[in-house]
Image: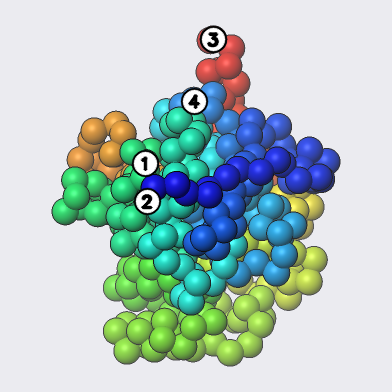
Amino acid sequence: MNHSTSAVDVQPLVFSNPSFKDHEQVVFCHDKESGLKAIIGVHSTVLGPALGGTRMWAYNNEAEALNDVLRLSRGMTFKAAISGLNLGGGKAVIIGDSRTQKTEAMMRAFGRMVDRLNGSYITAEDVGITTKDIEHVVKETKHVTGIPVEMGGSGDPSPVTAYGTYMGIKASAKYKWGSDNLEGRKVLVQGIGNVGITLVKHLTEAGMEVYIQDIHQDRIAMAVNEYGAKVYEGHYADADVDVYAPCALGATVNDESLDRFRCSIIAGAANNQLKDENIHGKALAERSILYAPDFLINAGGLINVYSEIAKYDRAESLRRTEKIYDTTLEIFTHAETKNITTHQAALEVAQARVDAAKASV
């Protein structure tokens, strides 16, 4: 069958984009028949193939999608490095509404695009992409993880991402308050997707008073009905809670929200929570708000899908994910000792591993 799938030349303003940080490869993908419009970003393959999920989102424009994939793929480099995985950093975004525009043909076209990169990029699930979609992708390429368990894969990585985030929240509580007992504490979970709903479960079972926000009413209803969560209607930064856990899109810590935060801890599963990692990371520290670096505490899903490459089992994946607790405490201590932000501390540790790998070549 003749498919008109094609990869087009990189558009202007990639190299000069503020989010371009020495990325190795940026690929724009289009398939006319299925309507696929996607961008694949490979930030680094120094530690191994660039593994990162595919996000499908109704971006306002192509520039927004490009900025997202550049930031996300870079974050994956540091996520793999700080977790001790032999992986590089990559990510993909598909432009469109995952609830109304996604089709099998589109996902298979995307699979063919991934296959053309010959293993330098390995895909998996992210926002808007399910294990069912991965079943379609795997028909076109072997460079995919998060494959359903019944097909021999590790399955949906979301529960493990949520578990790692939970470990990060407990570690944050230990460092901030001297105890990781969360009973009676209040938390706002923003984003009740596959990760968010499982995080709500963990936090509810830990005795927290859980407030939620989401743009989809069915997700809100699920959290309310299954876990007794309370709906928060106001601006997320105004919530009078102990912990703010962003689990949707990034950049919610920004100029507009900074002075409004009433929480003591920001720790969630969303990627790129700081709109500007230098300015906003420092501003949080100045306000004594403890920030748990996102690429550290949300690494559980990556650790889980890595098992399809490294050949270790679910129990080992969970053991490695539990170590996020200890690593988070180490990063907080490192930041305090060097008088730098927690984000800078995490970056230093991750970058040191990448640099060491480069030096050994």
Q: Earlier in the sequence, mark 4 or mark 1?
A: 4
Residue labelled with disc 1: 141
Q: Earlier in the sequence, mark 3 or mark 2?
A: 2
| Outermost residue, front side | 1
- Which amino acid type is shown beneath numbered disc 3? Val
Q: Earlier in the sequence, mark 3 or mark 1?
A: 1
> Could you say which is closer to the camera, residue 15 or residue 353?
15
- How many angstroms separate mark 4 from mark 3 (CA)? 11 Å
- How many angstroms separate mark 3 from mark 2 (CA)? 33 Å
Q: Is residue 203 visible?
A: no
Q: Secondary structure at mark 2?
A: helix
Q: Secondary structure at mark 3?
A: loop
Tell me the crowding category of disc 3: few under 14, some 14 to 19, or many 20 or more residues within 10 angstroms, Cα based. few
Tell me the crowding category of disc 4: few under 14, some 14 to 19, or many 20 or more residues within 10 angstroms, Cα based. many
- How many angstroms separate mark 4 from mark 1 (CA)? 22 Å
Per the rendering, the mark at residue 47 is 4
Residue labelled with disc 2: 137
Q: Are marks 1 and 2 in contact (CB under 8 Å)?
A: yes
Residue labelled with disc 3: 361
- How many angstroms separate mark 2 from mark 4 (CA)? 25 Å
- Which amino acid type is shown beneath numbered disc 4? Leu
- Which amino acid type is shown beneath numbered disc 1? Thr
Q: Are marks 4 and 1 in contact (CB under 8 Å)?
A: no
Could you tell me how many numbered marks the image carries?
Answer: 4
* Labels 3, 2: front one: 2
Q: Secondary structure at mark 1?
A: loop
- Which amino acid type is shown beneath numbered disc 2? Val
| Residue 181 x %, y % | 37, 65
Q: Earlier in the sequence, mark 2 or mark 4?
A: 4
Task: Quarter of the image for the C terminus: give it.
Answer: top right
Residue drawn 38% across the image and 62% down it: 104
